[in-house]
Amino acid sequence: MDLSTLFPVGILLFLLSLTLYYIWALMPRAQTPEWIHLKEKSSFQFAKWRHPITKVDILIALAIVLLWSAFSFVNLGDRQAPQTFHRFDTEYVVIDLGEPRTIRTVRYYTGLNTGEYALYFSADALEWTHAGEMTQRFSEVFKWREADIAWTSNVRYVRLGARTPGLYLGELALYGPGNVRIDPMELRFVWSDPRAASNALFDEQTLIPDRASFLNSMYFDEIYHARTAYEYIRNASPTETSHPPLGKAIIALGVRIFGMTPFGWRFMSILFGVLMVPLLYVLLKNLFDNTTVSICGTALFAFENMHFTQTHWANIDVFVVFFILAMYLFMYRYISSGYDAPFVKTLPPMLLCGLAFGLGAASKWTGVYAATGLVALYAVYLVTRWRHQKAAGQQREYLSFLFKTLAASVVCFVIIPFVIYTLSYIPYTVSGGRPFTLGGLLNDMWNNQKSMLSYHGSLVATHPYQSRWWQWMLDLRPILYYSHYADGNRTLIGAFTNPLVTIGGLVALVFVLSEFFRKKSKAALFIVVGFLAQIVPWMFVSRITFEYHYFPSMIFLALALGYIFNNLLRRCPEHKYWVYVFTSVSVAFFILLLPPSAGIAVPDWYSRWFVRWLPSWPF
């Protein structure tokens, strides 16, 4: 038996032992007040139950953020990359090598647009031999590439031109025997059209890497999201139009600050990943008023492999997850304001929830899926408040509150999100140098909705790493974003969850759901509704899906585990070490599985013994 197979078995045994202990620890002793209380029929209500944040909490949350940030910049990406590009149309350039040489490799850095360059070699600039192609396919933009050429000797002249007009090339490097790069100072350039001449092909030679990798090139869906962000900056027609524009516009902010570099196009993902941490801490503290629960629950989410991986590359999912967390935090603060809170006190969290919803929907439609849970919690609050105020003889006061609330809800949850969603299309509308008009903005937004519906509704595709919603819940089929094998080492990046948090969170959800039915726990309802709003819509999606779609659900698995921690600490505070043990083991698994989350090269034996826990894992 491989050592790797012991990990899933160990996790199941570990969780089974903790589950049995939890059941025993919380079992009411016969004839005690707790036992008698369970025999009574509980009623559900959203009374005021928000717990405040203290200065100590702020310091602790900041410490967790700093600790996670120390991990977050591991293998994020190079801070430098070619920034000047030459646009090839019909012209070509002839490179005089000064003397006959042997060309071993031609390395180049691609830019916008797709097509091919043609390479020709010659000994006398009279007779030319086709030496190979330099491809710039859709999946090869903003990457270091090597031309597919034969080892050619006695080359004095190199001719390079684009077969497809409009290609942008960032840098070019010629290598001789022994992989020694030819110094550009030894070369002379003659352009077929002097008006198109530039030195962009050889002006950033110090940035040429030894080999292409995820550290210096785009990988996976960065070719859509980061590329479109750059196109927004250049007012070029966007490539990726199957999702709303806001996520790509946020990525563009990092590019504007740090340049069109791997670090630049991934920076905003890291920033939003960092900001998720204090938001979750606040939600946990507001829910349970327990610092230990807040620390451990936040650590489970922060040091979780899906959270780490998804915040380390340029994708739009990280932004919608942040806004989902924000909208549930503010909805919680709304429904926990109490039944006697005047309308004016409930307005700020409602407004902030609506803003978060609008920003989430404008990033990706999964933000709309999450809103189904908001609607359910909002409706339960209004119904239970009616019952409370009716019992208190405050029907008139409630009707006044309800009228104002419904009017404000139209503004907060319809008008404001619609405005945000529409304004997010400004970069889309002005792309290609088109003038901005309100009519054009509305028309572009509406047409893109129809296009997205058509695209997602008719998409028929397969992928070797595709998976269904039930596989996500058991962490059965991660998706592999990047792989490189060399010299007995593996460099992998994949999206998968921390198995202890995934399976443990599901077990916790079962207990949380039972707590709602047995005790009418409002915190339990909040967590269960939030989780179901993330997973149920995917049950009806027939098109291709991947495990990273489970990312928003990890928020509520962490909350469910926090709920269990809180119950255990209230019932058996002397056994709080079990909470620390669970959290520590989870963080240990995170570190053990960090190589395929962060792209850290490890020997084959490490991957075989410590990473590939299940046969379905592509590691």
Image (spheres, rainbow, N blue to C red):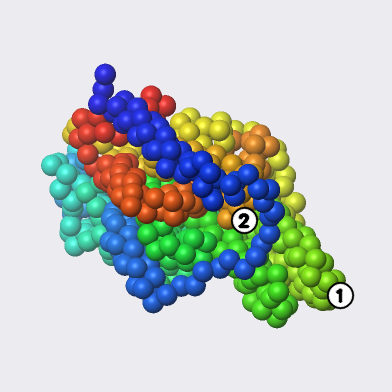
Q: Specify the amino acid type for callout 1.
A: Arg
At 47% from the left and 51% from the top, the residue drawn is: 567
At 37% from the left and 54% from the top, the residue drawn is: 573
Closer-to-camera residue (481/320): 320
Closer-to-camera residue (521/409): 521
Q: Looking at the rendering, which quadrant does residue 413 occupy? A: bottom right
Q: Where's the N terminus, which quadrant?
A: top left
**Residue located beneath label 2 in the image:** 522
Q: Looking at the rendering, which quadrant does residue 121 occupy? A: top left
**Residue that lies at the very extreme toward the front in this rendered image:** 31
Question: Where in the figure is residue 561, as x and y percent of width and height?
Answer: 46, 48
**Residue that lies at the very extreme toward the top in this rendered image:** 1
Give the numbered dot on residue 61: none
Q: Specify the amino acid type for callout 2.
A: Lys
Query: For numbered disc 2, what is the local secondary structure?
Result: helix
Question: Looking at the image, is 561 positioned above or below residue 507?
Answer: below
Mark 1: give few (<14), some (14-19) or many (20+) Cα within 10 Å: few
The answer to which of marks 1 and 2 sits earlier in the sequence is 1
Closer-to-camera residue (409/560): 560
**Residue located beneath label 1 in the image:** 396
**Residue that lies at the very extreme toward the bottom in this rendered image:** 344
Dots 1, 2 in contact, CB < 8 A: no
Residue 150 shows in the view: no
Question: Where in the figure is residue 376, as x and y percent of width and height?
Answer: 71, 54
Question: Where in the figure is residue 593, as x and y percent of width and height?
Answer: 31, 41
